[in-house]
Image: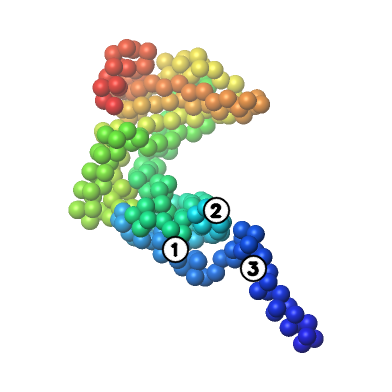
Amino acid sequence: MKKKNYRILLFIPLLLSVLVLAGCKVMMPSDYKKIKRIIIEDCNKVGLHGKVTITDLHWTPLESPTYYVSYTYSEDTYDDQTIKLEENNRAIHEDSSPDSYGSIKFLHYKESFLEQKSVQKVEKKIEKQLKKQKLGIPINFFSFLPNFSHDEKEKILDTIASENLKEGKKDFAGYYQIPYQTLIDKELVYMDIFIDDNASVTSQDMKDAAKKLDARDLPNGKYSFYYHNSKDRDHDSISYSFKVKDGKVVFYEDENLVLEDEDNN
């Protein structure tokens, strides 16, 4: 029995060597500690001081040996919520620059304002209003989406976050506690109206629905009807965009509106 146990003990180092040579590496507590420290340091650099939890970690011996990590980042917010952001399969090179911020590159903390209770409440209210209207197409749900892909918009958002930090509003580096009306006034969100995937809908149906839309209680901004065809093999998606201004629907076919949008962007 002792001899058998001895053979097993001899086999373990051999197995580990084979795994390493084959491109596998058993993750040790030291690896988890190392990667967690890198993530926390990257978070701290941009003002994020919440909780980091690693959910998966593995390693590959490419030209540059690389860790692949999945983790959650969470914070307790001013409106009594615990908001979690997820990052999946993020590559971190063993020789990464300390200033690369690679571990949080796609951690969408700047969009966290959408998770506020006040914003979610308005979102549900608008969805309820839309579903009550007879638009000729079945509404599935309504959602606010971030609208700061242009540099100018992101600068506006960054400025608001910076002012928040000065006022002690530190949730998600100042990007969380932004009033709903500010998001509308600064056009930092746009509005998507998602149509039931199981319906049969055309672009013309969407345009007709926009003409029927009662926008008197809707916020100003950019809107889109969005439909994903789940019935056909191609799974085509179509959308139709328009604006709401002062309680009225304004169509992009209006040349003046197109020029106005180009000037604003």
Q: Is residue 2 left or right of residue 246?
A: right
Residue 193 higher or lower than 27, as above or below: above
Nearer-the-camera pick, 109 or 121: 109
Binning the other alpha carbons within 10 Å of mark 3 as few (below 14), some (14 to 19) or many (20 upward) gives few
Task: Name which residue lies at 43% across and 38% down.
Answer: 124
Question: Label 2: how many residues lie within 10 Å, few (<14), some (14-19) or many (20+)?
Answer: few
Mark 1 lies on residue: 36
The foreground one among 61 and 150 is: 61
The mark nearer the N terminus, 3 or 1, is 3
User: Relative to 223, does residue 259 appear above or below in the rendering?
Assistant: above
- Three-letter code, disc 3: Ser
Spot occupied by residue 53 in the image (x, y as percentages of width and height): 47, 61
| Quarter that holds the C terminus | top left
Can residue 128 be seen here? The reply is no
Per the model, the C-alpha gap separating discs 1 and 2 is 21 Å
Disc on res. 151: none
Which sits earlier in the primary sequence, circle 3 or circle 2? 3
Q: Report which quarter residue 200 is drawn in.
A: top right
Relative vertical location of residue 202 with respect to residue 88 in this rendering, above or below:
above
Which residue type carries mark 2?
Leu
x and y, in percent, of residue 74 in the image: 41, 57
Label 2 belongs to which residue?
62
Mark seen at residue 17: 3
Q: Is mark 3 in CB contact (under 8 Å) with mark 1?
A: no
**At 37% from the left edge and 48% from the top edge, which residue is drawn?**
109
